[in-house]
C-alpha cells in the first residue's frame, strides 16, 4: 500500500485524487492533507481519510477547523499557514506527495517534499515553470522521482515508456482550444468571466479554465515539457484538437508517432502518477473510438491566442523570466476573475511585465531570486493595468 500526502486537497486535483484513494483503499492511504481555506471540506476529508497531519493555509481558519473535528479520536496534528503546509509536505512516511495547489504557491511545499526524499506527483505545472532551476537539481540530488500528473505531460510520459533516451524527436501538445475556440477574434473584446469559465471538455478550477481560454495553459505546458523531457523549444509544438481524446503525442527519430488516448478525465493521469510503473485495473468508462467519432486537428491562431508566443519567447529567454511570466499570468487572471480588467488585457499585462524584466533577468536564479521575481511581477501587473491604453504588441525577448 502506497502512503500519499496531498497538498491542495480541496481543489479539483485534490478531490479527484481522493476519489482514487476511495476507490482503491487497498492500494493507497493518506498520510497528510493540506488545503487553502475551505474548512468544511477539509474537515470532512479528515474524518473520512484520517490523516496523521493536516494544515489549512488560512491561519485565521485554524480555530474553526479544530472545532469541526473536536470529537475525532485520535486527533491529527493540525497546523496553519504556509509553514504548516510545508510541514505537511515533508511529514512522515508518505512515499509520494501530490502537488495540487494552484500556482506558484506550490513551489515551497514541493521543495520541502523533495528534500524529505519523497516522490512528487506533479499536478502543479507552475512549480516547475517558475522553479525548475532550483527544483531539478534537488530532484537529482535526493534521487526522487518527478512524475507528471497532468493529462498532457502524463500522455508524453506514457508514450515514452520503453523509448530510448535518444529516440525522442518532437513533442506535440494537444489543446482543446478552450472556451473560445469557435469564436471570431473580434468577439473576444466582449468576453465575460462567465464566458471564459465555460470549458467545452474538462472540469477544472477557475484559474486553469481561464488559462485554457487564453491558451496560456498550453504555453506554460511547453515550458514544463522542455524541463521535464529535455527537448529544445523548436521541437515542442502545439496543435488544436477539439475533442480532447488524444492527450499528446511524440514523434520519434524514425518519424513514427505515438499517442495516448482516453476520455477527458483527470483521474487517469493522476492514477498513473500514483501507481507507476504499474497499471491498475479500473471500471471507468473505456474509450470507444466509434462513439468518439471524428478526431480533428488544426493549427492554433496566434492572433486569437497571443499568450502562446509570449510563453515560447519567455522559455527561450530562460533564467528568472519564466517565474515572471507565471506570476504575471496568475495576477492578471485573478484581476480578470474579479472583473477588474478585460479578457484581452490578460496578455497585454503579461507582455508589459515581461518586457520590463528583460534587463534584470537572472540567468541562473537562486530560490530567493525566483521568489523575488514572483513578488515583483505580481506588483508590476497592478502597475501595468494603469497603462493598458498602449497599443498591444507581442515582445521578442532576447
Image (spheres, grey):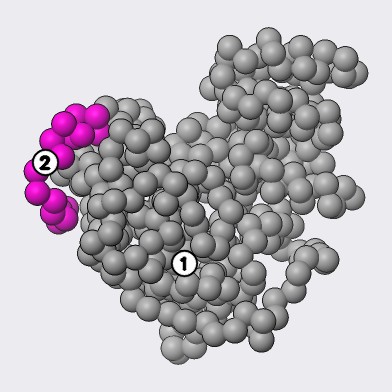
Range of magenta residues: 381-398
Going 43% across and 84% down the picture, which residue do you hit? 253
Magenta: main secondary structure equals: loop
- Please give the residue where the numbered disc 1 appears in the rendered image: 176
Mark count: 2
Check whether the beta carbons of the residues at disc 1 and disc 2 lie within 8 A of each other.
no
Going 30% across and 33% down the picture, which residue do you hit? 340
In the displayed structure, 68 sits above or below 287; it is above
| C-alpha gap between disc 1 and disc 2 | 31 Å
Whether 384 is among the magenta residues is yes
Q: Counting other residues with Cα less than 10 Å from the Cα at mark 2, is it few (<14), some (14-19), or many (20 or more)?
A: few
In the displayed structure, 16 sits above or below 239; it is above
Going 78% across and 38% down the picture, which residue do you hit? 30
Q: Is residue 40 left or right of residue 383?
A: right
Q: Counting other residues with Cα less than 10 Å from the Cα at mark 1, is it few (<14), some (14-19), or many (20 or more)?
A: many
Give percent across and percent down for residue 36. 58, 28
Give percent across and percent down for residue 145. 61, 51
* N-term mark: 1 or 2: 1
Callout 1 secondary element? loop
Give percent across and percent down for residue 8. 61, 36
- Please give the residue where the numbered disc 2 appears in the rendered image: 389
Residue 166 appears anywhere in the view: no
Amino acid at each position: 500500500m502506497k502512503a500519499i500526502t496531498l497538498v491542495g486537497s480541496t481543489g479539483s486535483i485534490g478531490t479527484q485524487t481522493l476519489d482514487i484513494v476511495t476507490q482503491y483503499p487497498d492500494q493507497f492511504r493518506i498520510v497528510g492533507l493540506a488545503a487553502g481555506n475551505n474548512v468544511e471540506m477539509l474537515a470532512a476529508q479528515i474524518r473520512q481519510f484520517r490523516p496523521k497531519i493536516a494544515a489549512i493555509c488560512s491561519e485565521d481558519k485554524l480555530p474553526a477547523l479544530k472545532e469541526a473535528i473536536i470529537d475525532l479520536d485520535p486527533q491529527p496534528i493540525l497546523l496553519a499557514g504556509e509553514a504548516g503546509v510545508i510541514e505537511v509536505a515533508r511529514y512522515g512516511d508518505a512515499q509520494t506527495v501530490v502537488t495540487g495547489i494552484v500556482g506558484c504557491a506550490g513551489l515551497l511545499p514541493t521543495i520541502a517534499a523533495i528534500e524529505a526524499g519523497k516522490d512528487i506527483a506533479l499536478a502543479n505545472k507552475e512549480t516547475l515553470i517558475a522553479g525548475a532551476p532550483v527544483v531539478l537539481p534537488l530532484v537529482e540530488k535526493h534521487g526522487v522521482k518527478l512524475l507528471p500528473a497532468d493529462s498532457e505531460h502524463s500522455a508524453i510520459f506514457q508514450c515514452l515508456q520503453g523509448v530510448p533516451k535518444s529516440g525522442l524527436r518532437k513533442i506535440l501538445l494537444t489543446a482543446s482550444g478552450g472556451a473560445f475556440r469557435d469564436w471570431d477574434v473580434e468577439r473576444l473584446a466582449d468576453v465575460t468571466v462567465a464566458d471564459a469559465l465555460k470549458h467545452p471538455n474538462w472540469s477544472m478550477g477557475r484559474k486553469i479554465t481561464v488559462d485554457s481560454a487564453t491558451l496560456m495553459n498550453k504555453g506554460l505546458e511547453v515550458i514544463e515539457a522542455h524541463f521535464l523531457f529535455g527537448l529544445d523549444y523548436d521541437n515542442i509544438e502545439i496543435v488544436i484538437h477539439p475533442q480532447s481524446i488524444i492527450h499528446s503525442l511524440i514523434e520519434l527519430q524514425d518519424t513514427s508517432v505515438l499517442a495516448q488516448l482516453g476520455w477527458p478525465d483527470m483521474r487517469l493521469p493522476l492514477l498513473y502518477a500514483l501507481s507507476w510503473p504499474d497499471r491498475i485495473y479500473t471500471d471507468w468508462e473505456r474509450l470507444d473510438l466509434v462513439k468518439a467519432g471524428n478526431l480533428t486537428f488544426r493549427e492554433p491562431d496566434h492572433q486569437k491566442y497571443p499568450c502562446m508566443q509570449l510563453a515560447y519567447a519567455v522559455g527561450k529567454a530562460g533564467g528568472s523570466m519564466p517565474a515572471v511570466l507565471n506570476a504575471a499570468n496568475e495576477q492578471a487572471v485573478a484581476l480578470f476573475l474579479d472583473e477588474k480588467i478585460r479578457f484581452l488585457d490578460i496578455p497585454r499585462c503579461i507582455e508589459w511585465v515581461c518586457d520590463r524584466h528583460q534587463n534584470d533577468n537572472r540567468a541562473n536564479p537562486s530560490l530567493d531570486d525566483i521568489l523575488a521575481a514572483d513578488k515583483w511581477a505580481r506588483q508590476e501587473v497592478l502597475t501595468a493595468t494603469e497603462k493598458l491604453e498602449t497599443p498591444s504588441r507581442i515582445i521578442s525577448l532576447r
